[in-house]
Every structure is written in structure tokens, then in C-alpha cells.
Amino acid sequence: MTGKNGQLGSELLSLQLSYPDYKLVFLDRNDLDLSSLEGLSDLFEHYRPTFFVNAGAYTAVDKAESEKELALAVNGIAPGKIAALCQQFNTKLIHISTDYVFDGNGEHPYLTDHPTRPVNFYGLSKLQGEMAALKENEATIIIRTAWVYSAHGHNFVKTMLRLMNERPSIGVVSDQYGAPTYARDLALCIMDIIEKGADHYGIYHFTNEGKISWWDFAMAIKEMAGLSCQVNPITTAEFPTPAKRPAYSVLDKQRLKKDYGIIPRDWKVALKECMGYVQRF
């Protein structure tokens, strides 16, 4: 599994004792640099994995606009090379992608086969990675997710908690809609797919259930943390960023439910659990 130190990788790492029947090997960028993939063949030769989870990625959405070569190498090119080796070693690939492959102009949850049209380079690089992986290995599962957070690393939940403790008021965008994903729930989804044999391939969507704005998300964090900070709704235009964000990115999860029987939790239930972990530290 790549991305050992990321949000998803950290959650997968924390689950390993719950899956004693599997030998889980976690790789960080010192073990495998996704921008060059030096030594990738040797890793496959040594471990000969049954499954390969590519949870590593270039995730700096705004920086990707100016670091296009690096973003493309990690997100667009590496998945294809990994998939080719998975094909060679008869390994099933689970590759993590993003809601940012869509343009955000929709009004209903995006189906897995909805036409893609990224509005920023990060989304474009991830889309190219999807296409490369599926082209190189038919035994590939793509899981698109969105608004990922956890008790680990940098994410919206932890940023909001910090700002709400530091300032009397903050502004949060209220005209972008999606569904948050607790990284632990995504990790459990991946392990569930593996336990069920990962024998349905193609593109799937996973987030927690619901449709909210970033402002709704921030208000729930404030309420659960018992903070008094004033959270003001603002428009996307009032909070410009180098990379454009999709205005609507709710993902339809029916294919995942049908093929693997995985039913995501409500976003508030998942957030409450994560907040319990975050507030212990």
C-alpha cells in the first residue's frame, strides 16, 4: 500500500491488527517515490502482492497549478506503471481517485460513468491516472472519493478547529456542495472489498452519505466541539484560490452498494466519531 503517512494510509495502518489473515506492507515515499517509481519492479518481485492499494498521491490542489509536471508524474503516470506491473504479477489494483474529475455543473449525484471534465490540473492529473490504470490492467478498481478528513495529517476538520480556537470569527464557502469522507470509513471500505475478493472491477464512488456545503461542514464541527467562533457563509468569489473548485461534487454510490454491499454511514455520524479522536490530542 502506498501513501503510508497520508490520511488514508494512516487509517489503513491502524486497521492492520484487525486483519490478521493478511500481511499488509505499507510504503512511504522513502520506500517508493511515486514521481520516479525507482525500484517498483523489485518491490513486486520481492512481495508478489495479491492486492496493491495505491493510496499515495499528489494532493496539493492549488500547488498543482504551478507544479504540473510533478502532479502529472505522481497522479497521472505512476498509476499506469503500477497497473502494468499488477497485470504482469496477476495483482488486483485498488487505486484512489477524486470527485475533481467532474466539472461541478451537475445537480444530481454523479454516476460512475458520467462524462468527466476536470476544472483544475489536479483533477486532470487524477483523471489521466484513472485512464492509465484501467488501460494497463483490467483487474483495476478505481475508488473516487471526496472531502477526505481524519485525525491524521492536514485536513478541513483540523484546520477549522484550529481557526475556531484562534479567531472570534471566520468565513467559510457556502456555495460548494459535496459529501465528506472520513478516511477511516474509506479504509474499512477498501478492506471490505479485499475480503470479498475484489472481483468486480471498474470505477466506484465512496463518501459518507449526505449533501452539504463547506459552511454546513464547519457549523457541524463548531457544534460538536462546543466552540463559540462566529462562522460566516461566504461565496466562492469571495475566497479565490489558484485552482478552481467544482461547485457540486456529490457522488452516487449505488454501484458500490450493489456489487460489494457496502453502505456508507451518514456524514454526521462519521464526523462525530472522528471528532472524538481529534479532541483527545
Image: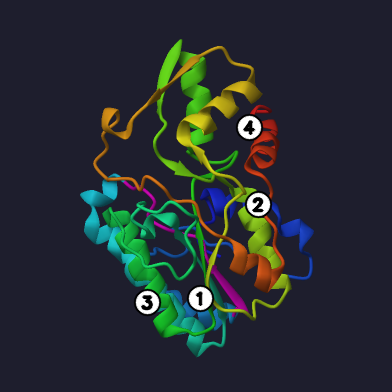
User: Considering only order in the chain, which callout, 1 or 4, is on the residue closer to the N terminus?
Assistant: 1
| Spatial CA span between label 2 and label 3 | 26 Å
**Residue 241 in magenta stretch:** no
Principal secondary structure, stretch drawn in magenta: loop
Amino acid on which disc 2 is placed: Asp
**2 and 1 marks in contact (CB < 8 Å):** no
Q: Which residue is mark 3?
A: 132
* Residue displayed at 30% across by 30% down: 239
Q: Dot 1, how many residues are within 10 Å of its Cα: few (below 14), some (14-19), or many (20+)? A: few
Residue 173: x and y in percent read 39, 31
Rendered residue at 54%/25% (across/down): 219
**Pointer 3 or 1: first along the chain:** 1
Q: Which residues are magenta?
A: 49-61
Camera-near label (4 vs 1) is 4
Quadrant of the image for the C terminus?
Answer: top right
* Residue that carries the numbered disc 2 in the rendered image: 185
Q: Is residue 112 left or right of residue 256?
A: left
Image position of 201 (left or right of 65)? right
How packed is label 4: few (under 14 Cα within 10 Å), some, or many (20 or more)? some
Instruction: Say whether disc 2 or disc 1 marks the residue closer to the N-terminus.
Output: 1
Amino acid type assigned to the residue bearing label 1 in the image? Leu
Amino acid at dot 4: Val
- The residue located at (20%, 49%) in the rendering is 66
Between tags 2 and 4, which lies in front? 2
What residue is pinned by disc 4?
278
Label 2 – label 1 distance at C-alpha: 28 Å
Above/below status of 220 relative to 25: above
Mark in the foreground, 3 or 1:
3
